[in-house]
Image: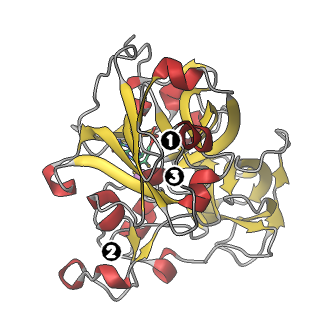
Amino acid sequence: MLNPFRKHPELIVHGAHPLNAEPPLPKLRAHYLTPQDLLYVRSHGDIPRLDGAAHRVSVGGRVAREVSLSLADVRAMPPRTVRAVMQCAGNRRADMRAVRPVKGDPWAAGAIGCADWTGAPLAAVLEAAGAETGEGLHVAFTSADTCQPSDGGAPYGVSLPMGKALHPDTLVAYAMNGEPLAAEHGFPLRVVAPGWAGVRSPKWLSAVTVQDRPSEAHQQAGDYKLYPSDMQPETEDLARGLTIDAMPLNSAVTEPAAGAALKAGRLVVKGYAVSTDRGIIRVDLSGDGGRTWSQAEIEDHGSSRWGWTFWHGALDLPPGEHEICARAWDAAGQTQPALPDDTWNFKGYLSAAWHRVRVTAA
Ligand SMILES: Nc1nc2c(c(=O)[nH]1)N[C@H]1C(S)=C(S)[C@@H](COP(=O)(O)O)O[C@H]1N2
Ligand SMILES: [Mo]
């Protein structure tokens, strides 16, 4: 069984080898559950074409008995479906790049999507091997793809601390929105770690190892760190980096597009907001660069702890140039920073300032 899907022809391609691409924002905002052909693709190496019948995932390390599981074995476990956002730590990096140069692809606000993921809880996979589950242990993952030389040149690897690994919503998934995973999204099996940066949801899973320390693979040990703004590539010091786990509060305007020439008058603004698992309580909209605000309407797509929130609102724009801004608030009463300058870091991670979109009305 090979990839039955094709990516949407309108994806914005940041790089073809390896494939890194995101959907145009209005297309992304058209579906509460992101169709698989529109989900962004973030890959560190070539996409492996795995044989679903022959593929095995080994479970070893601090376990009672090593096991080697087929896709059929995982499908035979009691299934669980979790509605969750997948989001890259580099989503909205383009806004930080506009402040000062950053490393990495200039993702707009489309390195995100939301889906119903179905699989076996990772806890059940660990249980099948009689894994130790003590606090302080880590569950390391190795994938079947080989990363670019600049990304360590080795198989992709990350880990989750035992607490996150045992969370009932952390899955070894085989389906997205009820369809088998496409090759580019991890066929036949991937981890889904809801609320955490996409990097911690390894695709093309081939080995699970229970161990007493985090993965030493480059993705876990040497990349995906949030650095202070005074650090530069030449002074990179891993010890001063925060390993990125949960994703911050964020929101984006998906319509109108930056640079749009609009008719003066009533303008409908649409977007998304995301809060890991705290919940979005409000989204504010401004048509004047943040001097005055009104509230957007939050759309009801059913409650889901790890999902995203769609919103829309109206602004009255007189003729002239305008800066539209959106900012979300979470259930702890926190909101987003005003400027990308406030959280700028040379890797361009966790870019979550008010989304600003300049338009002209005539
Ligand atoms: N094996 C493997 N897993 C991976 C990656 C990868 O390159 N190889 N990229 C990670 C990153 S950084 C992200 S953001 C998500 C993207 O998932 P998607 O391409 O299905 O949207 O997959 C993660 N899992
Ligand atoms: Mo990512």
Q: Amino acid at mark 3?
A: Ala
247 in relation to 268, above or below: below
Tell us which disc is closer to us: 2 or 1: 1
Tell us which disc is closer to us: 3 or 2: 2
Q: Which residue occupies 61% across, 50% down?
A: 194
Q: Amino acid at mark 2?
A: Phe
242 in relation to 252, above or below: below
Q: Earlier in the sequence, mark 2 or mark 1?
A: 1
- Looking at the image, which is closer to me, 57 or 288? 57
Q: Which residue is mark 3?
A: 109
Q: Which residue is mark 1?
A: 191
Q: Give the CA separation, mark 3 to mark 2.
A: 18 Å
Disc 2 on helix, strand or loop?
loop
Residue 234 visible in rendering: yes
| Mark 3 beta carbon near ligand 1 (under 8 Å) | no
Q: Is residue 297 left or right of residue 202?
A: right
Disc 1 on helix, strand or loop?
strand
Q: Is residue 206 left or right of residue 147?
A: right
- Residue 152: x and y in percent read 19, 56
Q: Give the CA separation, mark 1 to mark 3.
A: 23 Å
